[in-house]
Image (cartoon, grey):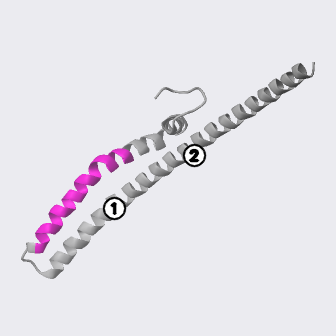
Amino acid sequence: MDKHAHVRHPKEVVQEAKNSRRRDNKLLYFNDIVLEWITNHVLASVILFDIALIVPLLTLKAPDSVKITLGVISGSWIQWWALPALQRSQNKTQAQNDAKAEVDHETLTYLAKLQDEQMTELKGIAEILRNLKNK
């Protein structure tokens, strides 16, 4: 789809926010990069690690206290990695929704102004036609 001079894409708004963060606070910008990488790459391997730990627990001939301890450790790993990743994805979704709302508002404002200009033009044409008809 071609770009329009008066209608922005939400990705442009999100990218502008990233660029602004990069200019304003480099530490936060690089923190976002690290969090995104962890969310996209490490989380899956941690979950697979947990599965690889929990499945043998079911068949392992060990005292229940050992199984419970390993289960708690595994659960802690999930919480340490999954909760920040979920928060990160929730923040990204909210930023995308905010960008979409901003772009929608800009587009509707542009359309309303265009409509006002068209109505003014039509009123002028109607006035000209009335003047010509009365002559």
- Rendered view: 1 above or below 11: above
Q: Amino acid at mark 1?
A: Trp
Q: Quadrant of the C terminus?
A: top right
Out of 99 and 114, give the one closest to the viewer. 114
Which quadrant of the figure has residue 81? bottom left
Q: Position of residue 30 (x, y in %)?
A: 42, 40
Residue 95, which numbered label? Answer: none
Q: Quadrant of residue 74?
A: bottom left
Q: Residues within 10 Å of mark 2 (few under 14, many from 20)?
A: few
Magenta stretch holds residue 25: no
Q: Is residue 35 above or below residue 69?
A: above
Query: Taking 110 as reference, is 4 left or right?
Result: left
Tell whether label 1 touches label 2 (CB within 8 Å): no
Regarding mark 1 in the picture, which secondary structure is present there?
helix
Neighbour tally class for label 1: few under 14, some 14-19, many 20 plus, Cα within 10 Å: few
Task: Tell me, for residue 101, which label it has, or none.
Answer: 2
Q: Residue at x 54, y 36 (%)?
A: 20
Residue indicated by mark 1: 80
From the viewer's perspective, is the residue at label 2 or at label 1 nearer? Answer: 2
The spot of residue 57 in percent (x, y) is: 13, 71
44 or 113, which is in the foreground? 113
Q: Residue drawn 16% across and 76% down?
A: 67
Residue for point 84% across, 23% down: 129
Residue farthest to the right? 135
* Residue bounds of the magenta highlight: 35-58
> Which of 89/60 is in front?
89
Q: Quadrant of residue 66?
A: bottom left
Name the kind of residue labelled 2 in the image: Ala
- Which SS type dominates the magenta stretch? helix
